[in-house]
Amino acid sequence: MEYSLIILLLPMLLFFVLGIGGHKMSHRTAGLLGTGGLFVITALSYAVATQYFTQPRVEGIYPTLIPFHIEWLRFTEWLHIDLGILLDPISVMMLVVITTVSCMVHLYSLGYMHGETGFQRYYAFLSLFTFSMLGLVVATNIFQMYIFWELVGVSSYLLIGFYYTKPAAVSASKKAFIVTRFADLGFLLGILLLSYYTKTFDFAVLTSGEVSLAATTAGKTFLGISVASWAMALVFMGGAGKSAMFPLHIWLPDAMEGPTPVSALIHAATMVVAGVYLVARLFPIYVTTPEVLTMITVVGAVTALYAAVVACVQTDIKRVLAFSTISQIAFMMVALGVTTEMQGHGALGYMASMFHLFTHAMFKALLFLGAGAIIHSVHSNEMSAMGGLRKYMPFTHITFLIACLAISGIPPFSGFFSKDEILAAAFEKSAFWGIWLSLVAGLTAFYMFRLYYNIFWGEEAHHEHTPHEAPKTMTIPLMFLAAVTCVAGFIPFGHFVTAGGCSYDIHLDWTVASVSIVIALAAIALATWLYMRPNDKPARMADSMRRLHTWAYHRFYLDEVYMFVTHKIIFRRICEPIAWFDRHVVDATMNLMAALTQSASYRIRTLQSGRLQAYATVFLLGALFIAFVLLCVW
Amino acid sequence: MNFLSLFVLIPLLMMGGLALARNMKQIRAVAAVGSSLQLLLAAVVMVLFLQERAAGNTVEMLFIADTVWYAPLNIHYTVGIDGVSAAMLLLSAIVVFAGVFASWKIDPLPREFFLWLILLSIGVFGFFISINLFTMFMFYEIALIPMYLLIGVWGSGNKTYSAMKLTLMLMGGSALLLIGILGIYFHSAADGNLTMNILEIARNNAIPHEAQYYLFPLTFVGFGVLGAMFPFHTWSPDGHASAPTAVSMLHAGVLMKLGGYGCFRVAMFLMPWAAMQLSWIFLILTGISVVYGAFSACVQKDLKYINAYSSVSHCGLVLFALLMWNTTAMTGAVLQMLSHGLMTALFFALIGMIYGRTHTRDIREMGGLMKIMPFLSVCYVIAGLASLGLPGLSGFVAEMTVFVGLFQWSDTFHRVFTIIACTSIVITAVYILRVVGKLLYGAVQDEHHRSLTDAVWFERLSAITLIVAVAAIGMAPGWISRLIGDSMSVISERILQYI
């Protein structure tokens, strides 16, 4: 499958062509070039996927293929960064997800970004992102993953700040980069620790059990926790930053300042699941450090609940979707966290997590693209500017409804199947996590339908001009993704991707499924009762829970805490004093030395006064002094 | 006559040409042709060197030539290069080339400006080809003196103060160095055949441990002052702020590398035992440099101060990595020298071009430049991304090699300082993005700026040359890392034998 290399090289080439020569092209050429390229690599990815999953299994599992591989930079005898392509079930699945969503977003952007200044730049950045994201998922070693990890970070930075004259976009892009950079510091330290003990970066070696982190670090502890756990926890920190896990999630809601198709691609479907992918990729090592898995479960569960609560009260539709993304990714994290073994019953969570990643990418991209169509039509992100849009935008309405049903977990849409597997896996581990996640799933259904009714039903807002359905280039991607969302649940996912690689039949656990359907329906009913027709019930409800409402609306003031720490403490109490110290202590010492030399030379200068009497006096005193020394002291 | 001496000869001819040049056009022609020739020469030398190595010649220094200058004091003119010097020569040639084009419109006294600038380059090139303590020191001094005049005459702001400060502090460093070098010379051989040749001194390995104990700090600090080692770095912010564009470029890009280069070539290579024993002191100092510079850069308001402090941080990492002795870390240190040289030169070139248009370097008075001068702004973003270690650009390769090298020591002292050094990647991102956000994005701050023009051809040439070099190292680092690694392993093994 050597042609898989083209999947990587083509977007890189497009980036250079559009980035360097883009300003000389017309919008049309640039857009068609970018989109055409994406169609090609999407087709190639499907070909890779078909060929990969139709090949014979070896001992019941799909073999790991490395069709391309070079040494890029050698550090030491055993540590070297390689660049290559690794195909195994999860990376092939990710190839399909990324190229599909990216392709739809490219197509959609032709309409959405039509006439924007910087159109060519936009397509160049999209190509850069696609290249980096694909490079990330096919990485053969953890350092290659880190390289592309940073590259997706910078593409995300560039795309969030696409409207660079808007101060909010500039500060959002900065925040996204710095927060994820901070998390990446953990990732880097984790990689370095891991590679120091295992003497390799290679995934194949790391995960095959040839070298065992637990064995090479046996007996080594730091602050009472084993070094192996430290390394894996630090690596997870990187994943938590990219995947917007609490408390490193603060950049994602702000990242919505970017163009909406970008939010769909990067901040909903692909880049933000990189953290989940990372944990899944290194899962054979995570299994050996149960305390880190427990940490992942706790972090994921807290994030899921937190984000769901916040999503219930936001008024900006993109922010609701952003918090819902955080919450859904947290589901995937929890699913990985509750996985306890590579084979058998305890391994369900891994498959569930990957399955949910797949279905979520499709329906969340659909939701964002739908939101984009709405924003495109009413020129606002605020729900108050919407309402009653179902009449004006029928395609958007239907597709959005399908996505809402999917995310709420209503059969037969894809989200139901994957979420059900996650719940089953959580119940397998302990009833506590199962109930916790079921409640969050209920909240999900509630806030999604609150959003849905506020946009498409409710009171019709006063529009300056009548809202209109989006152009074809925008509705076709919506319909395609809606179709995928309808059927994706029936994919026998367990046959393709499982923890140990062995085929596994998904069977619904109807006790779990029926409970979750009942909860979801109840939540939808509540949302219908509150939001379908204009009334004062939501306001009264908010009043009755005034404090919770305010806190949730302000995202529990976490951003303010961060602002306090970075500005008031790091900036005011560390940076400024250091700069002051440098000027007024270190540099002043140097100046003082210069000044002392100068004043000393002024003093000494008076000795050379030219007055004969003075010379005679000094001469005489000196002679006497020497005579005295010679006579008495010697 | 060895062809390495062409590195000194070409600038001398250029100076002759400048003296004869009758008008601005001819001055520029001489400078452009001369610097292009030098760049070509550096590239040819690199190719020749790689060919020799590929042919299996594993002698540590190639193309050695030795001429007696003054026999009674054993003063020789000795040249020769290894992989690191070949790389540094290429770096210097690139920066000089870019610097000439960045000062295309220098005013006043263009002839004198280029004369001094080229004299400075003689010092730099001479230093990197020397393998004799005397010639090394001589070229080092040649590089320092023109700096005073270049800043004092063509500088801006508080230029006389800055020029004086820079010169005096660096001279202070070279005073320490002189003592150190003399000390090394008098201990250079056990049998009385004293020598200044670095290779011979290393082979003799005769410097007693007690002597190393005081000679190592003298030479290390002496060179460290030029490498902006805390607390001897304060010449750097003032000096850069006042210096004209090309001088800032050459200074931060190349001259500061003389410091790092001297540290391993003289101090560590010749006195490995003391390097081993005393490194902890300097690790603390340079470790402080790394974060201290970065934190200071976060609150600066003048573009040049920001980059000067960021240089303190990046050059701190160079010395820090050198003191970790192992080949990987030391290779990373040299890569960081190259990478920092190229990207700081790019930064200062761009700052000079922006300053030439807006007449301010205060980031509070500028904004939205991306709309007004897209080419310069994009280049600035690229420089910034290189500085914060984006993969695909040189900074990443250098930093990662350094960090992997640092992590090979697992004792608590090294681990703690390593982790402290690693945190600089976050702080760097903070100050780089702060500047990019304020300077290039957002709304235009000053309405007068709207009428400004974007870069012209010579400015573009200067910036593109540097960007290509930064990207080349960033995308294909294998060969240069191997080249440097081979040379550094010689030094590293000398030190590691004392463990």
Image (cartoon, coloured by chain):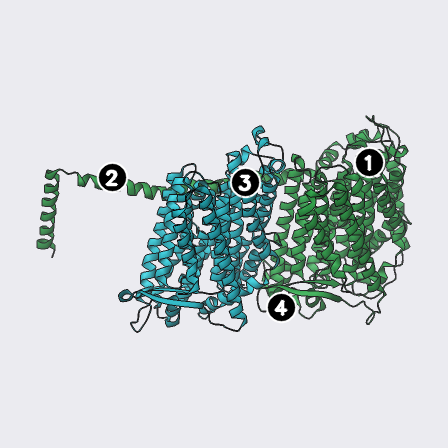
* Secondary structure category for the residue under label 4: helix
Asked if disc 3 and disc 4 are in contact, CB closer than 8 Å, the reply is no
* Secondary structure category for the residue under label 3: helix
Mark 3 or mark 4: whose residue is earlier in sequence: 4
In-image side of A476 versus A583 (left or right)? right
Looking at the picture, which amino acid does disc 4 mark? Thr
Q: Position of residue B61 (x, y in %)?
A: 45, 68
Q: CA distance from mark 3 to mark 2?
A: 43 Å
* Secondary structure category for the residue under label 1: helix
Residue count near mark 3 (Cα–Cα under 10 Å), binned few <14, some 14–19, many ≥20: some
Q: CA distance from mark 2 to mark 4?
A: 68 Å
The colour one sees for chain A in the rendered image is green
B470 and A566: which is toward the camera: B470
Residue count near mark 1 (Cα–Cα under 10 Å), binned few <14, some 14–19, many ≥20: many
Q: Which mark is residue A602?
A: 2
Q: Which is in the foreground here, disc 1 or disc 4?
A: 1
Judge if badges 3 and 2 mark residues of a common chain.
Answer: yes
Q: Is residue B196 above or below residue B145?
A: below
The colour one sees for chain B in the rendered image is cyan
Looking at the picture, which amino acid does disc 1 mark? Ile
Q: Is residue A302 above or below residue A171?
A: below
Residue count near mark 4 (Cα–Cα under 10 Å), binned few <14, some 14–19, many ≥20: some
Q: Which is in the foreground here, disc 2 or disc 4?
A: 2
Q: CA distance from mark 3 to mark 4?
A: 41 Å
Which residue is the site of mark 4? Answer: A216
Looking at the picture, which amino acid does disc 2 mark? Tyr
In-image side of B157 versus A43 (left or right)? left
Specify the quadrant of the image occupied by residue A235.
bottom right
Judge if badges 3 and 1 mark residues of a common chain.
Answer: yes
